[in-house]
Image (tube, rainbow, N blue to C red):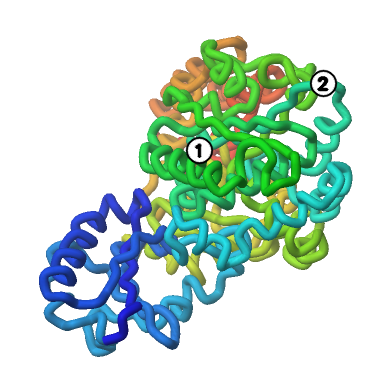
Amino acid sequence: MRSKDKVFVPRDTSACSRGTDLIAAKLQHHFAQNNIAVDVVRNGSRGLYWLEPLIEIETDKGRYAFGPISPEEVNELIDSKFWERNTKHAKFLGLTEDIPFLKKQTRVTFARVGVIEPLSIVDFRNIDGFQGLEVALTMRPQDIVKEVKDSGLRGRGGAAFPTGIKWQTVLEAKSEQKYIVCNADEGDSGTYSDRMLMESDPFCLIEGMIIAGLAVNADLGYIYLRNEYPLANLILEEAITKARKANYLGKNIQGTRKSFDIEIRLGAGAYICGEETSMLESLEGRRGEVRPKPPLPAIEGLFGKPSVINNVISLASVPSIIANGAASYQNYGVGLSRGTLPFQLGGNIKNAGLVEIPFGTSLNELLYDYGGGSRSGKPLRAVQVGGPLGAYLPQSQWDTPLDYEAFSAIDAMLGHGGVVAFDDTVDMALQARFSMEFCSIESCGKCTPCRIGSVRGAEVIDRIISNKNSAKNKELLSELCDTMETSSLCAMGGLTPYPVRSALLHFSEDFERG
């Protein structure tokens, strides 16, 4: 037995929910009690969630994986002496990197996720960590912004606005104080990429925020973190402390006379605070309500100062762009959708997990080549892409390429990359009703179309389902959707018609109860 053998047990929230803390404790106890020279490392999850808990052992050929291993199966795993490369074990999966779900991916932003110990700066640096920052520290702000512009990176939070243009606006704004705000209030159904990255590679987000600060001359950043992510909060706090001690945060970063620091603020469970201006209200200590635009947050943002507002994946994509050049990112994707996007497979899907791939792959490939079809074994019927405000797509649209413009052309959106699948037992009329009900619950209440329209929408759908003057109520629902889309103050009310209309259009039979 070699002295440097390592066993990897994920510390990611989803993995922990399957018992990895207990598994790690049992393994550590056994190795210590029996004087076996194996270290237990708490890495992040690889995102192969249907295989969690996934246990890995480091070898000369790479990491071998075993899974899923429940806490009740750990003793049997130990008895098999799996750390001695027991390839005959029933849960042996071979080399982790050769598992088809992972092997076919193009991991750029998630290159370190599940590989490193999240709070080890040494591990982070060993796989290209802080290389982008080192390059950025030698560049002029305008040159950093230009590189991000040229890469084609667009916001990964849902709106897909070009990141470099947003940064350019903040750079040109005249102010002695500017801010970088990371929107980590990941509230869309079926999404978890932000959480995965913060828990598994927190220094990547920190590096991206520092580079953003250098690009627009901001010296302070805030992470607005979803309150329901306690482990991400714990890991980020420790990572920020370690980054300060290593002189990557604070004054005189790496001896360059440049400064930047980060603070964390917790949200209060309001979905609406995922909208950038509502988030700013919350950050400033007020109730989370949408602000009218203009002024844009890039001009008058946090505390009335010019502010860059990006989500976790947008900021975490920046370091590799600066380290490797804009052209390296442009190599991936199609049309105006450049780079990669981490899609998150959930709902009734066999292989639930995170898939980072370039834009342009079809939804059908994502559902079957990666997702493996439905978990229930029944035919898939509908897929909602882009969170609770995304359209419901029928099978006839699953050949649509995963890119912003192609989805816009079919009145759908990619959003944050959440993909929720439904088999043929789903009632799409109830799903449409849920969309209106969700809006009524989560609306900030500031504008009438969203606040009142969503309540009336649920009522109208109830009448349609009850076959009460169905034809006229469908017309009324269509007019109501038009009003919400064109008159709501923000995307909360403006996008709620997407799932409702798509359900009516593609699954009309579910609204016929008579």
Amino acid type, residue under disc 1 in the picture: Glu
Q: Position of 138 compared to 196: left or right?
A: right
Mark 2–mark 1 Cα distance, whole angstroms, equals 30 Å
Q: Which of 420 and 314 is in front in this view?
A: 314
Residue 380 placement (x, y as % from top left): 44, 59
Report the residue at 30% width, 70% height from top.
55
Q: What element carries label 2?
A: loop
- Residue lying at 79% horizontally and 50% vertically, measured from the top left: 148
Quadrant occupied by the N terminus: bottom left
Query: Do the CB atoms of the residues marked 2 and 1 lie less than 8 Å apart?
Result: no
**Mark in front: 2 vs 1:** 2
- The mark nearer the N terminus, 2 or 1, is 2
Q: Residues within 10 Å of mark 2 (few under 14, many from 20)?
A: few
Position of 156 with respect to 154 (left or right) is left
Of the pair 211 and 376, the residue shown nearer to us: 211
Residue 500 point in image, percent of width and height? 55, 34
Which residue carries the number 2 mark? 175
Kind of residue at disc 2: Ser
Residue 308 picture location, percent across and down: 72, 32
Q: In which quarter of the image is residue 348?
A: bottom left
Front position in the image: 381 or 36: 36
**Nearer to the camera, 153 or 397:** 153
Tell me the residue at 43%/23% (across/down). Answer: 268
* Residue 275 on image: x %, y %: 60, 27
Q: Residue sitting at 44 percent across and 49 percent down? A: 199
For the residue labelled by badge 1, is the local secondary structure a helix, a strand or a loop? loop
Residue 238 image-quadrant placement: top left
| Residue at which label 1 appears | 186
